[in-house]
Image: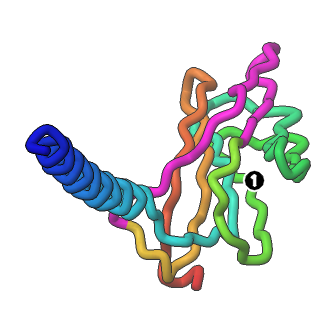
Amino acid sequence: MAYFEQDTVTQETSIETMKKTVVVMSVILVAACAGTNRPSYSVNEILLVNNSREVLREVKVSVPSTRRSFSCGSVAPLGICGNKIPRRRYEYNPIRVEWTFGNRSRSTGEFIVQVPDTFSAELPLRGVLAVSQDGSIEAYFEQDPRLN
């Protein structure tokens, strides 16, 4: 009889350990999900800024997953090509930029622009694609209270 009592105690201890493990894992899972929760941002403008001394030609900015795009035939040195869009939720979709710099076609491949942690979800984002002197592109977001 003592053998069964010992098994019962061992089973009860195992069940209690499993219950504690389930509780701890649930807390970890909830904390992990809370850590990845991002605010819902919106975007309403995209600017391509040519900071180089070359004319950019055949510029195309696209979001392949949505099949949306816009083009700028050419952008003068130190010029800007902009696209205002109806305010919409930013969904972190990869974008792709293609352009001709000098006599050479270039492309970024697909990339995602991250929103800085310091930005407010209340204000819309302005996506900026800045072309440098060497023809490379830097992508980032700006916020301006006047955009609201």
Question: For the residue carrying disc 1, how many other residues have a C-alpha within 10 Å: few (<14), some (14-19), or many (20+)?
Answer: some
The residue sitting at 78% across, 62% down in the picture is 83
Tell me the residue that label 1 is attached to: 81
- Residue 108, how many percent across, how many down? 69, 27
Residue range highlighted in magenta: 95-118
- Residue 124, how many percent across, how many down? 58, 75
The image shows residue 84, relative to residue 65, as above or below, that is below
The residue sitting at 13% across, 38% down in the picture is 3
The residue sitting at 63% across, 25% down in the picture is 135
Depth check: 69 or 23 in front?
23
The residue sitting at 88% across, 47% down in the picture is 71
Q: Is residue 6 left or right of residue 30?
A: left
Which quadrant would the C terminus be assigned to in this image? bottom right
Depth check: 28 or 101 in front?
28
The image shows residue 58, relative to residue 16, as above or below, that is above
Q: Which residue, as the protein is rendered here, is positioned at the far front?
A: 1
Q: Is residue 134 left or right of residue 18?
A: right
The image shows residue 134, relative to residue 48, as above or below, that is above
Depth check: 146 or 28 in front?
28
Task: Please give the count of numbered marks on the rendered protein.
Answer: 1
Q: Which residue, as the protein is rendered here, is positioned at the far top?
A: 104
The stretch drawn in magenta includes residue 116: yes
- Residue 142, how many percent across, how many down? 49, 62
* Amino acid, disc 1: Cys
